[in-house]
Amino acid sequence: MAEVIWTTARLAGLTTVLLLVLATPIAWWLARGQGVAREIVGAVVGLPILLPPTVLGFYLLLALGPDSLLMAPLQALGVRTLAFTFTGLVIGSLVYSLPFAVQPLRNAFLAVGRHNLDAAATLGAHPLTVFGRIALPLAAPGYFVAAILTFAHTVGEFGVVLMIGGGIPGKTEVLSIEIYRLVEALEWRDAHVLAGLLVAFGFAVMLALLMLERRVARTATEDL
Amino acid sequence: MLRGLLALAASLLAPATAGAAEASVAVAANFAEPARIIAERFRARTGHTATLSFGSSGQFYAQIANGAPFQVFLSADAERPQRAEAAGLTVPGTRFTYATGRLVLYSRDGGRVDGRGEVLRKGGFEKLAIADPKTAPYGVAAVETLRKLGLYDRLAPKIVQGASITQAWQFTQTGAAEVGFVALSQAVAGTGGSRWLVPASLHTPIDQQAVLLRTGRSNPAAVAFLQFLKSPEAKAVIRRYGYQVR
């Protein structure tokens, strides 16, 4: 049981860190203008919210499998498939949780406001300086929200892992799947323990988010 | 065409006319195809309707134990109907084995699996898919087979588990796993590939049992459906899909 929890935490943690990095340029670009291209990219990024995880999982199984064009370069290196590997799960989780990182960051960057950034730029600041010294600190609450949502959402991931995991202990066996297996195997007591843990975790996450929101709102009013 | 439409309209408007009843049947996903055909024939023969729900036996058990409105349970194993019986959820004396599954070692690559399963000894594959032995009788049978062949410890690092036998089939069909222990009922549907029908002596029989649930005690359609499942007509369908019938 401890191993399953550890694998889940490792998966969610790694996904969160990677996704905050990956989502930053996407969210920044999406927040910094308008146009058809941005709408389309925004829609694609948001897709995992409404696609059933089994659809994502099915495509990922094919995309990470031996017939996939995406896998061709890796196959040259001797990797036949990324399905059934921890790496495969991380890739799946990145796709699955992408909108939960991009959306809060995009909103945060939007809230920073054009005039702040334009003012800095007019004063001759380098775009990277503008980003690092002004946008990033102001968007910090957005990063907290994105991190919490991404981590929690990845912990709750089920369909994707079910489709590409293969239930290998210590590598691809995660909490949500383990609960499913326990219910299936009629071991309801253990299922209760793990499910209870997840409920407590979920409650803590929601509480943290609400408190964060309140705090952000308070700072915003204080700034006025 | 018109008559068909009228019949459809009539059936939609009056699902319970003239002695025709309806039964809700929980069917293990691996039995979906034969169950559909059997339900059609059942309707043609008796006028009763069997409404099928497909899912995993374990989930069905959990739902039935918590008052799900099923009247008949076609499980993928014998254990869950037995548990249901012990828990007083069934009509005593109605439980029987409606199909016995056979295990097949399958690969979508022609020629990879030989007729005697020697490929397991020789290796040359990265992943071997099985159904989760914790939840699926086909998974248990696969592990028993490997143990009996004395290969379990050697092959354990190559094993990937599907949550169900359906998933083990998916893993094998997509080539994500080069070989896999699947159900004969699945392999008969697959074209091409290579297979080894695992001798039944290598594992405990994969008995799939059906039972009348307490909720279906006075439902004529439910009672009749289980009766029909034992008929030569239904048995022929079940056999055609790669199951053995006693």
Image: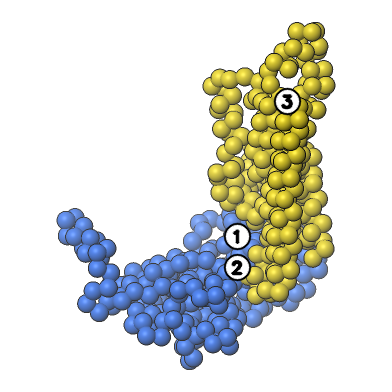
Q: Residue at label 1?
A: B167
For the residues labelled 2 and 1, say whether their Cβ atoms are less than 8 Å apart.
no
Instruction: Return the residue nearer the eye: B34 or B28.
Output: B28
Q: Residue at x 79, y 46 (%)?
A: A13
Q: Residue at x 27, y 76 (%)?
A: B20
Name which of mark 2 and mark 1 comes first in the sequence: 2
Q: Residue at x 66, y 26 (%)?
A: A110
Label 2 and label 3: CA atoms lie apart by: 71 Å
Quadrant showing the N terminus of chain B: bottom left
Instruction: Return the residue nearer the eye: B80 or B162.
Output: B80
Q: Residue at x 82, y 23 (%)?
A: A132
Does residue B95 appear in the picture of this structure? yes
Residue B19 versus residue A22 in the image, above or below: below
Q: Secondary structure at mark 1?
A: helix
Which label belongs to residue B104? 2
Query: Which numbered disc, 3 or 1, marks the residue closer to the eye?
Result: 3
Q: Secondary structure at mark 3?
A: loop
Which label belongs to residue A161? none
Q: Chain of mark 2?
A: B
Which chain does the blue colour mark?
B
Residue B105 versus residue B112 in the image, above or below: below
The quadrant where residue B136 appears: bottom right
Q: Chain of mark 1?
A: B
**Residue B191: image location, x then y, percent:** 50, 56
**Residue B209: image location, x then y, percent:** 52, 80
Which label belongs to residue A224? 3
Q: Amino acid at mark 2?
A: Val
Label 3 and label 1: CA atoms lie apart by: 57 Å
Left or right of B158 on screen, residue B230? left
Query: Which numbered disc, 2 or 3, marks the residue closer to the eye?
Result: 3
Instruction: Return the residue nearer the eye: A158 or B191.
Output: A158
Q: Residues within 10 Å of mark 2 (few under 14, many from 20)?
A: many
